[in-house]
Image (cartoon, helix red, strand yellow):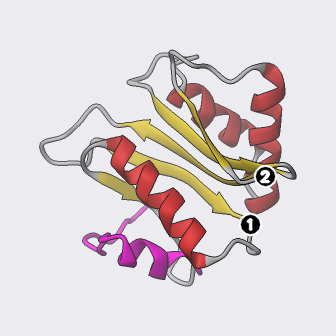
Amino acid sequence: MGATIVLYTAFRDANPAEKRALVAFFSRHFPHTPLSNITESLEYALKKRPSFGGFVMSLEDESGIRAAVVANKTGMDAFHPGHQFVFVAFDKELDKGTVMTFLEKAKAYAKGGISLHLKKDHPAIAYFKDLGFSEEYVELRS
């Protein structure tokens, strides 16, 4: 059996089991991120809390979730991209072609500008550059 792309939105919400699976998947890939942060991003994308919404897309096969993206709408289009990919994760065993196809579908579904934050040494930077993303700004935090 092949992999299937599953799309979750405010109109096609994740049921409790699907939400637990998504949180667990992101938790495995972002072990230092609090579960509350992952849950908050999912709830924002699915409009379970006041927000502009967004979407969650996953790639699933018989073994479970293999890749997933949480995309939050920013409510801006003029000076900031309309979506931010808050969490993007994929199993290391996936071949680059599968990952790129999945990311291309997420990018196309966003229909417009997308931003994402990655650490300088993140292994997926090359994938995003191959998809047309570029480094434009330096983020400073306090």
Q: Position of residue 94 (x, y in %)?
A: 70, 71
* Location of residue 15 with respect to 96 vertically, above or below: above
In the image, is 46 to the left or to the right of 132? right
Mark 2 residue type: Met
Q: Position of residue 63 (x, y in %)?
A: 87, 52
Q: Position of residue 80 (x, y in %)?
A: 22, 48
The foreground one among 50 and 141 is: 50
In front of the other: 71 or 37: 71
Based on the displayed image, in which of its 4 quarters is residue 36 positioned?
Answer: top right
Q: How many marks?
A: 2
Q: Pointer 1: what residue?
A: 91
Task: Give the residue drawn at x 52%, y 25%.
Answer: 9
Q: Which residue sits at x=57%, y=42%?
A: 57
Which quadrant of the view contains residue 109? top left
Vertical placement of residue 136 versus 58, above or below? below
| Magenta highlight: main SS | loop
Q: Residue 52 at what x, y percent from top left?
A: 38, 24
Q: Amino acid at mark 1?
A: Asp
Which of label 2 and label 1 is nearer to you? 2
Q: Residues within 10 Å of mark 1 (few under 14, many from 20)?
A: some
* Residue 31 appears in the picture as rendered: no
The 10 Å Cα crowd at callout 2, few under 14, some 14 to 19, many 20 or more, is few
Figure check: 121 above or below 103: below
Depth check: give the residue in front, 74 or 95. Answer: 95
Mark with earlier residue (2, 1)? 2
Mark 1 element type: loop
**Which quadrant of the view contains residue 93?**
bottom right
Mark 2 sits on what residue? Answer: 1
Disc 2 is placed on an element classified as loop
Query: What residue range appears in magenta?
Result: 123-142
Residue 118, magenta (yes or no): no
Closest to the observer: 5 or 35?
A: 5
